[in-house]
Amino acid sequence: MKLFDVYPLFDVTVDHGKGCYVWDDKGQEYLDFYGGHAVISIGHSHPRYLQTLQEQASKLVFYSNAVKNPLQVKLAEKLGPICGYDDYQLFLINSGAEANENALKLASFYTGKKKVIAFTHAFHGRTSAAVNVTQNPKIQAPINATFPVEFLELGDIAGLRASIAKGDVAAVIIEGISGVGGIRIPTAAFMQELRKVTTDNRVVLILDEIQSGYGRSGKFFAHQWFGIRPDIITVAKGIANGYPFAGVLISPMFAPVYGQLGTTFGGNHLGCALACTVLDVIEEEHLIENARQQGEYLISALKTMQIPGLKELRGLGLMIGIEFDYPYKEVRNRLLYEQHVFTGAAGTNVLRILPPLCITQHDCDLFLERFDAAL
Ligand SMILES: Cc1ncc(COP(=O)(O)O)c(C=O)c1O
């Protein structure tokens, strides 16, 4: 059997990792400023993570959601105070798309409506409802268009008011910082107005923090920079440092109904144990503060650097976008194949910097030096 060939691959085979470095099968070391797409939060092969993996796997990897799972309760009790949403409820699944799928379903159950407002260049995943609120026709099949969606420009408050005034909107879904869309940061004024308009009209506000959450922006959630509290928050990627895991944080205004949501694998024992260890390490190693400090250091250093063709530099914490007025492809290839640095990308012109939250100033200096050489 052959693989279904949907990924254009780099000619690198990553074999193992440690902290914010990975090595290929020939022993070449790479600086990982991509984190496998913002997934590695506490660093590759963290000793605490490996210990939990071994201990929990030797006890129990999985049992069904039909029985009590104290690890789920432990995770919820740990996550609540750390992220500032102790009064919310946690529903666990396996991936970001699934988190958004369930968030949108909850909003529709709650309001009895089905229209959703999303934003230009939004990316919310590839499953049916999530891809329908993703602004990329190339990845939407005809069967995905099952409910009406209106895409507004980020910051378009007049459009938002006009759309919501029609009375048919179930939810607004927005990324804390748009990732795949090219690191676009909403303004606090817009987010506060968005919160007000949705509250006033009983529209559910969903914050997709799958990429921007879990400390990446220098606060637990990116929306916490804007002083708002959404009704639903979705998390994935960094939650279990590479083990497939995700969550939906649900405001107390939603009452749970037996059987309304469910999953086979979501909230499994191994995932919960790993997610608890990730939170412990984030706290003990002050990784959110580190993300803020190293992010500030990187952004201010990049600002003073001569970057030919630089159009705009955007970022918060360790979610940084370098937009060129030409395609990034050659720079990214030189970074990977000559300088041995992994980076992310968005569209054709934005280089995305998404390193593990444990990077040091030395790693940043190494990145800056190699980036300069690749330009
Ligand atoms: C903001 C955002 N939402 C949702 C997703 C989908 O997550 P997953 O690939 O785990 O389904 C992603 C993935 O890149 C994302 O960046």
Image (cartoon, rainbow, N blue to C red):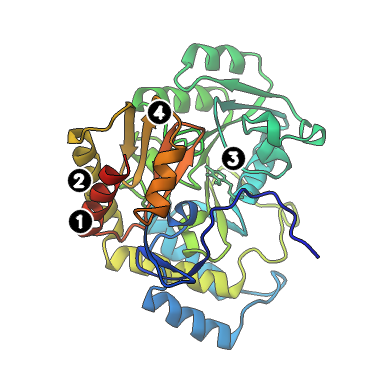
> Mark 3 vs ligand 1: CB under 8 Å?
yes
Q: Earlier in the sequence, mark 1 or mark 4?
A: 4
Mark 2 and mark 1 in contact? Answer it, CB < 8 Å.
yes
Q: Residue at x 50, y 79 (%)?
A: 53
Within the image, what quadrant is residue 155 found in?
top left
Q: Earlier in the sequence, mark 4 or mark 3?
A: 3
The span from disc 4 to disc 3 (Cα, nearest Å) is: 16 Å
Provide the residue designation for mark 3. 124
Of tags 1 and 4, the one toward the viewer is 1
Report the disc number at residue 186.
Answer: 4
Provide the residue designation for mark 1. 361
Q: Amino acid at mark 2?
A: Tyr
Where in the figure is residue 106, as x and y percent of width and height? 66, 42
82 or 295, which is in the foreground?
295
Q: SS at mark 2?
A: helix
Within the image, what quadrant is residue 278 found in?
bottom left
Q: Residue at x 65, y 14 (%)?
A: 166
